[in-house]
Amino acid sequence: QIVATAICRTDEHLRQGCFPDAEFPVIPGHEGAGIVESVGEGVTSVKPGDKVIPLCQPQCGECSFCLNPESNICQKSHLCKPQNLLPDKTSRFTCKGKQIHHFLWISTFAEYTVVPEYAVAKIDAAAPLDKVCLFGCGFSTGYGAAINTAKVKPGSTCAIFGLGGVGLSAVMGCKAAGASRIIGVDINKDKFAKAKELGATDCINPRDFKKPIQEVLTEMTGQGVDYSFEVTGHADTMIAALASCNMSTGVCVMVGLLDSGSEISIDPMLLLTGRTWKGTVLGGMTLKKII
Ligand code: NAD
Ligand code: ZN
């Protein structure tokens, strides 16, 4: 039984057709928390009444990725094979006799859902479900992008493009890692107050400047930031985020999801000088270990 679910932009990307393997009609939602209502035969890790978080990135515990402590992706994830139907190739949702597809096996925009055992994690019985549902994607992704993927160092300078739920969590991760300057970048200035409350030291709107935002950030910081995070899901901001980190040791983390079929073209010199460009899924978190 799903008790709480949050909305992440990835659900909107699904609606817009950014997942080439997705099938419609579908029940989206992948950031939820609930209570086990019943279990199938052979299920041992959860029992009725347990509070749980469904995992949009499953953890089968058996594939070569799951067995690699440096990886947080499972080969049963949608990234490796579509999860539009449950592993037994059936759907548990119908509407007026018509089959409805699952999303990432968890479809949390439903009052009840059915998930494989390896796509659910038991949590503390006292956990407030309306808050911990954010561990299912947004918070883990942004916070983990800073802590696990970028490995932000104390005293460093960071720029976060996009101050939605995921970007704000990246701000929190940078702050927790001890960054001394955290610059929030968003075209919506209404996001700035919350970002500053959570640790951003400066907030800028690219639309307030005539020059490209990467030039603005480079001027603000001397050589560019130490770590940049793209959390909007646009190709142009991916390039701007990459160019905003310093040419020698700068690390840029790609968090935002691009439209299916998008391609990015960059000047190779951006990487040749030493910058690192990385991507992240769920901020490198293996949720069964942290919740
Ligand atoms: P959101 O819509 O809540 O926030 C996006 C923010 O970006 C908004 O504040 C918006 O004003 C801002 N923005 C839009 N265009 C901009 C631009 N050109 N320059 C600066 N700011 C701009 O989205 P969210 O739920 O926080 O998700 C952010 C992205 O992260 C999405 O693309 C989502 O799919 C992706 N995501 C990736 C993972 C992962 O595992 N890699 C996990 C979760 C979400
Ligand atoms: Zn998400």
Image (cartoon, helix red, strand yellow):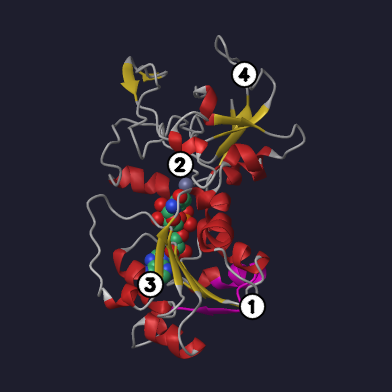
Q: Earlier in the sequence, mark 4 or mark 1?
A: 4
Q: Earlier in the sequence, mark 1 or mark 2?
A: 2
State the quadrant of the C terminus.
top right
Q: Earlier in the sequence, mark 2 or mark 3?
A: 2
Q: Which residue is mark 2?
A: 73
- Measured as percent of width and height from the top left, residue 3 is found at 61, 32
Foreground: disc 4 or disc 1: 1
Q: Earlier in the sequence, mark 2 or mark 4?
A: 4
Residue 242, labelled with which disc? 3
- Measured as percent of width and height from the top left, residue 173 is found at 61, 62
Question: Would you say residue 199 sits in the magenta stretch?
Answer: yes
Q: Which residues are magenta?
A: 192-205
- Measured as percent of width and height from the top left, residue 64 is found at 44, 35
Q: Which residue is mark 4?
A: 37
Does dot 4 land on a helix, a strand or a loop? Answer: loop
| Amino acid type assigned to the residue bearing label 4 in the image | Glu
38 vs 112: above or below: above
Given residues 129 and 236, the one toward you in this image is 236
